[in-house]
Amino acid sequence: MNELQATAIDQREATRIRLTVNGKLHLLDVDGNTRLLDLVRNDLGHSGTKEGCSVGECGACTVIMNQEAVCSCMVLAAQCNGAEITTIEGVAEDPLANQLQQSFIEEGGVQCGFCTPGVLMSTKALLDKKPTPSDDEIMDALEGNLCRCTGYQPIMNSVKAVIARNHDKDKQ
């Protein structure tokens, strides 16, 4: 058996992982080729996480892993042992995520909606860490999210509107 054949066999062997997805603990057996995206969508049924490019370029599959926005198509499920994962479904009751969703509607930051879950997750991860980021920090956080419909200015306006509202609340 050559090295390539041995690697292919190793990747098919199941690995037991323990991870928390949207607050629920899961103990799962995954093979070496299973991506976090496939685990979330196919095994756990969280279809709000979209598959776009499959190479980490579009951001449609963005989830929050241990408080960091990541492209789930680029993370192997076996790498998630012990991780805490939040998908778009996991922020349904989150006040900040709800503010962002409402602002995207009001400011025209959503059109076809395909990229929206990933954009919201990237933005939420940023605002959770830094409630009043600069424009450059917002653009950096969103740089991995592609949108073919809005032209980005409405997305920026949506995020900035939430920041402004929350900053005004903090002053009161």
Image: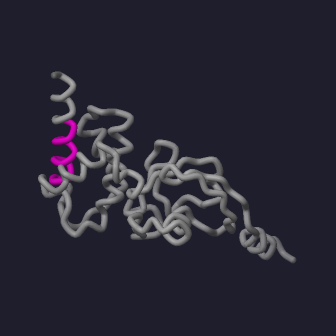
What is the magenta range?
153-163
Which residue appears at 12% of the width and 53% of the height?
106
Quarter location, residue 96: top left
Residue 154 x, y percent position in the rendering: 15, 54
Question: Is residue 136 left or right of 108 when viewed as pictured?
Answer: right
Question: Is residue 61 left or right of 143 when viewed as pictured?
Answer: right
The majority secondary structure of the magenta stretch comes to helix
Question: Is residue 127 left or right of 24 when viewed as pictured?
Answer: left
Comparing 170 with 144, the one in front is 170
Q: Quadrant of the N terminus?
A: bottom right
Is residue 84 covered in magenta? no
Q: Quadrant of the C terminus?
A: top left
Comparing 95 with 77, the one in front is 95
Which residue appears at 37% of the width and 51% of the height?
91
**View extreme (top): residue:** 171
Quarter location, residue 168: top left
Question: Total marks drawn?
Answer: 0
Q: How is the image coloured?
A: one colour
| Picture layout, residue 93 above or below residue 27 | above
Residue 90 x, y percent position in the rendering: 42, 53
Which residue appears at 46% of the width and 57% of the height?
71
Which residue appears at 21% of the width and 37% of the height?
163
Question: Is residue 87 left or right of 155 when viewed as pictured?
Answer: right
